[in-house]
Image (cartoon, rainbow, N blue to C red):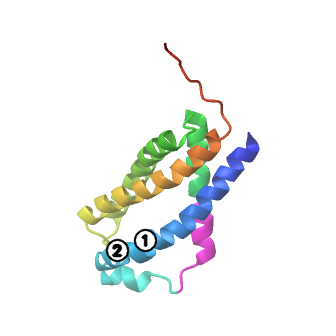
Amino acid sequence: MKTKFFLAVLAASVLAFFGGWLIFGIIFNEYYSSNTNQAAKLLMKSPTNMWAVAVSNIAWALLITWVLQKTGSTNMMKGFRTSIWVSFLVALVFNLSMYAFWNIYELPFLLVDSVISSIFWGIVGSISGAILGSGQKVMVKVTS
């Protein structure tokens, strides 16, 4: 069981790292850049600390995989559904806190970010759920 857990965390971490680069760094890059004010842009690091991005993805993948294991969300669809809700709530808490204390982003952008982030992590969670559930016997009800 521990092997599946760590394999799920590893797969989710790798998917999150490269998927995040694709989704946030390429596909939605212009959207995020155009919704960040100049003061925030001045505070951004260049280049990004990639080790911190990787560790962040590992931590998030670990959290999602642990929640999936604890809730029995051990298939692709349950993994997606559970991860999307957990991620939405965490992103919403973080984004609303940023809105409350910082003058960086506008509220509509932060709500959209919560949705984009939760869908992204829902997809990552679907992989974790599939790995956690791999090898489980499926009960089929046969009727005549």
Q: Quadrant of the N terminus?
A: top right
Relative image position of residue 41 (x, y in whole percent): 38, 83
For label 1, the residue is: 24
Segment colored magenta:
47-57
Q: Which of 42 and 70 is in front in this view?
A: 70
- Taking 6 as reference, is 95 above or below it? below
Relative image position of residue 65 (x, y in whole percent): 59, 47
Please name the residue shown 61% across and 68% down the image.
54
- Taking 111 as reference, is 43 above or below it? below
Q: Which of 108 and 81 is in front in this view?
A: 81
- Taking 24 as reference, is 120 above or below it? above
Q: Is residue 83 magenta?
A: no
**Residue type indicated by callout 1:** Phe
**Residue type indicated by callout 2:** Tyr
Q: Nearer the viewer, residue 129 or 88?
A: 129
Callout 2–callout 1 Cβ contact below 8 Å: yes
Please name the residue shown 40% across and 48% down the image.
89
Q: Which residue lies furthest to the front in this view?
A: 144
Please name the residue shown 40% across and 50% down the image.
88
**Mark 2 or 1, nearer chain start:** 1
What secondary structure predominates along the stretch shown in magenta? helix
Helix, strand, or loop for circle 1? helix
Q: Which mark is residue 32?
A: 2
Relative image position of residue 36 (x, y in whole percent): 32, 77
Q: State left or right for residue 88 relative to residue 45.
A: left
Crowd band around label 2 with a 10 angstrom C-alpha radius: few (<14), some (14–19), many (20+): some
Tag in front: 2 or 1: 1
Please name the residue shown 32% across and 73% down the image.
104
Q: Is residue 48 magenta?
A: yes
Relative image position of residue 82 (x, y in whole percent): 47, 41
- Taking 91 as reference, is 104 above or below it? below
Q: How far apart are marks 2 and 1 (CA)?
A: 8 Å
